[in-house]
Amino acid sequence: MKKRHAVVLVGTLLGLFLGSSIGIAAGGTAINGAWVCAFLGAFIGWLIGRDFEEDSRSLQGSTEDQHLDEYSSSSSEPPSKPQGTSPFKAVLFGGVALIASFWNFHIDLLSAINLLNNFCNQPWLFVGLGILVSLVFPPFGACYFISYVCAAQFGASKENQYRAQLS
């Protein structure tokens, strides 16, 4: 399974899950929010996954060239095809990438209100922000921590202003 498809699948499933508890009414009729949110989740997953498709194309070309070089140097046996990722690993990667993109959105918001430099100079402010918002909305603390861990998997650090490098 390609990474791009995995991110789209995770976005769709997340949209179905979140939208299943809401309804959308307009023009005298109403539908289950899962239909709308699933489409929006798939679209967001597609937007996030665009960078992964370009990277996999460039990586695929380089591995094919490498295998052709190996085959031409030793003609005893044909080159083996590179192993693809399992669907479970691809979906797990898609989920982590989607959650890390939420962290990047948070970093972009801090940058838009000119607070990112303060947060980069004093990283304990990230913890303070998580605790402060958790006082009003308790599930936010767990979501904030999980998004930080997912962003850390993509190299979020002080050197790159705590942005996850998704591409």
Image (tube, grey):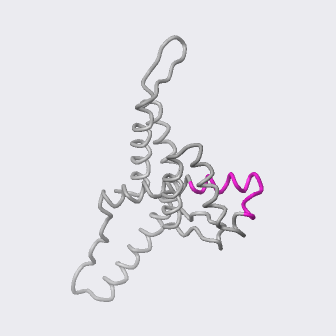
Spot occupied by residue 130 in the image (x, y as percentages of width and height)? 59, 55
Q: Which residues are magenta?
A: 103-118
**Residue beneath the point at 59% across and 43% down:** 136
Residue 17 against residue 143 in the figure, above or below: above
Residue 32 against residue 121 in the figure, above or below: above
Answer whether residue 63 is magenta in the image: no
Quarter of the image for residue 111 reads: bottom right
Residue positioned most to the right: 114
Spot occupied by residue 24 in the image (x, y as percentages of width and height)? 50, 23
Front one among 152 and 66:
152
Residue positioned most to the bottom: 73
Answer whether residue 106 is magenta in the image: yes
Q: Quadrant of the C terminus?
A: bottom right
Residue positioned most to the front: 135
**Residue beneath the point at 31% across and 71% down:** 82
Left or right, residue 17 beside residue 161 = left
Spot occupied by residue 97 in the image (x, y as percentages of width and height)? 48, 57
**Residue beneath the point at 40% across and 74% down:** 63
